[in-house]
Amino acid sequence: MQMLKIIFLWLSCLLVCNGYRLLGLFPFHAKSHFVMFEQLIKGLARKGHQVDVISPFPLKKPYPNYTDIVKITPPLVLVNNMSYEFMQVLLGTNPVYAVGTLAGNDLCENLDNPMIQELARNPPKDPPYDAVLMEVFGAHCFGIFAYLLNVPLIGVSTTSLYPWLPPLIAQPESLAFVPNNCLSITGRMNFWQRLYNTLHTFYNKLYFNYLTRVQDEIIKKHFGPDMPGVREIESKIALILINSHFALNGIQPRTSAAVDVGGLHIQDEGLTLQPELEKWIDDSKDGFVYFTFGSMVMIETFPREFLNILYTSLSKIAPVRVLMKVPSPEKLPPDLPENVYTSPWMPQIKILKHPKIRAFITHGGLMGTQEAIAYGVPMIGIPLFADQFMNIDAYVARNVAIKLDLNKMTEKDMDAALNAVLWDPLYKESARNLSQKFLDQPLNALDTAIYWIEYVIKYGSDALRSPAMDLFWWQLSLVDVFAFLLLCIAIIIIATVFIVRFVLEMINGNYHASLHSKKKN
């Protein structure tokens, strides 16, 4: 037995020693974003790689090969702290401005953190870092670490690519049939939609780059005047792991450096149901509906009119039960229906995969809706802000969700939506079919992400680099080729006209000469 322990420890050592050392940089303070990063890091750690992490969300329990080295103090606490009033302010803010400043420039000021500065001056040598993982969103200034360490920079996007991200890896945008992810356009676009998609995408790129140009100064301020600017850092990204999948986001071309890993975060390792909650679910003979507005929004702060609609409609579906995530249940209005169970925290994946779940009422956050899709749960979407409108519109188009307008919905609307997702087999069947398409992959999302991270480390930053990165826009769009062809056509036309005119003049000249000769005779 002792010998077996020694062999096991020796093999474990070999596994760790053969792994890579990675630096994870995830400064944005949204828990919904970090859910994906946490599962990616844990997956890498289980493979024997050592990951050091800088984020606002250190783990509460130790995890092998996962080390939180710096906790970033967020400028604003978002987890279970977004009131209805604050949400209204957020709705009035340009999304690009919010990403470029609140989730971008403001976070870059954390680069003056003494522990981050010490890491830049004295990075570990035994072993050194092999790559840097960074969220591609707004704070790309953190990519300076890949430059300082001279290792590959790997991006991770928690959504499909925002308009300013495709140029980082020369990802074809295909605006004729792929709407940018800030627009709620589904299906084939008409001319005006294609025009708007093109102008909207071009504007967002320019505006984001304009807003974040200040990151150049922040980088040089904290690391020296000879440091590269943020646009140069962005151009060195070797790979972007994207939380998307063609079954949900549609067919589009992909460069090798853009890898879809939609659903990577859907892991239930270590999740358990509280005994009281588990008993409540098991006793739900007619099933239950799960209701949450995500990790940030406080539903108890919503207008009483909206909550009254919920109370009345949810009570009507009894004996079907309702499980509602509420940060502060004691702040809800009185007379909560008897079939509703509230809790400040829920192990969401455990709930969505439970065989007794009937439907999911959601704000449309990408992580939660992907989890619902994975387990074939139909949805009622009440989008609140950001990409939630686009997400729900996409699911409505696939018959897996019904959309309600927060500001216009009535009791009748809510009743109709609940009756549809609970009793119309179309929604359940569509959700099951979409789930099969989403999960039917040769390699699961997490293993796919780990494979390509290891690939870039083994073969270098240029292993997946598109040749398009070395071309100017006018070369990439073949403007010079078409201009040359037009010039050639113009020369041919001009030459043809000249020759024809010359021949005609010769013919006319000979004809007149002949007439003149005859007159003389």
Image (cartoon, rainbow, N blue to C red):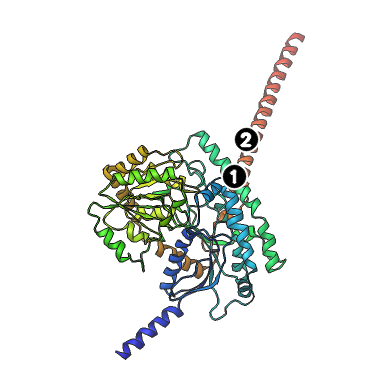
Q: Residue 14, position in %: x, y?
A: 42, 81
Q: Residues within 10 Å of mark 1 (few under 14, many from 20)?
A: few
Q: Is residue 327 left or right of residue 89?
A: left
Element marked by disc 1: helix
Element marked by disc 2: helix
First in sequence: mark 2 vs mark 1 = 1
Q: Tell me which residue sits at (54%, 58%) in the image.
A: 136
Q: Residue 420, position in %: x, y?
A: 30, 41
Kindly identify which residue carries mark 2.
Answer: 489
Location of residue 389 with respect to 66 vertically, above or below:
above
The Cα–Cα distance between marks 2 and 1, rounded to whole angstroms, is 32 Å
In this rendered view, identify the residue nearer to me: 201 or 487: 201
In this rendered view, identify the residue nearer to me: 95 or 356: 356
Residue lying farthest to the front in this orientation: 334
Location of residue 168 with respect to 308 vertically, above or below:
below
Q: Amino acid at mark 1?
A: Phe
Q: Quadrant of the C terminus?
A: top right
Q: Would residue 311 be seen by someone viewing this image from the given angle?
A: yes
Q: Would residue 133 be seen by someone viewing this image from the given angle?
A: no
Q: Tell me which residue sits at (44%, 42%) in the image.
A: 406
Q: Is residue 117 left or right of residue 311?
A: right
Image quadrant in which you'd find residue 148:
bottom right
Q: Amino acid at mark 2?
A: Ile
Q: Residue 246, position in %: x, y?
A: 41, 50
Q: Which mark is residue 202?
A: 1
Location of residue 360 with respect to 220 vertically, above or below:
above
Q: Quadrant of the N terminus?
A: bottom left
Q: Residues within 10 Å of mark 2 (few under 14, many from 20)?
A: few
Residue lying farthest to the left in this orientation: 285
Location of residue 234 with respect to 319 vertically, above or below:
below
Q: Residue 337, position in %: x, y?
A: 32, 49
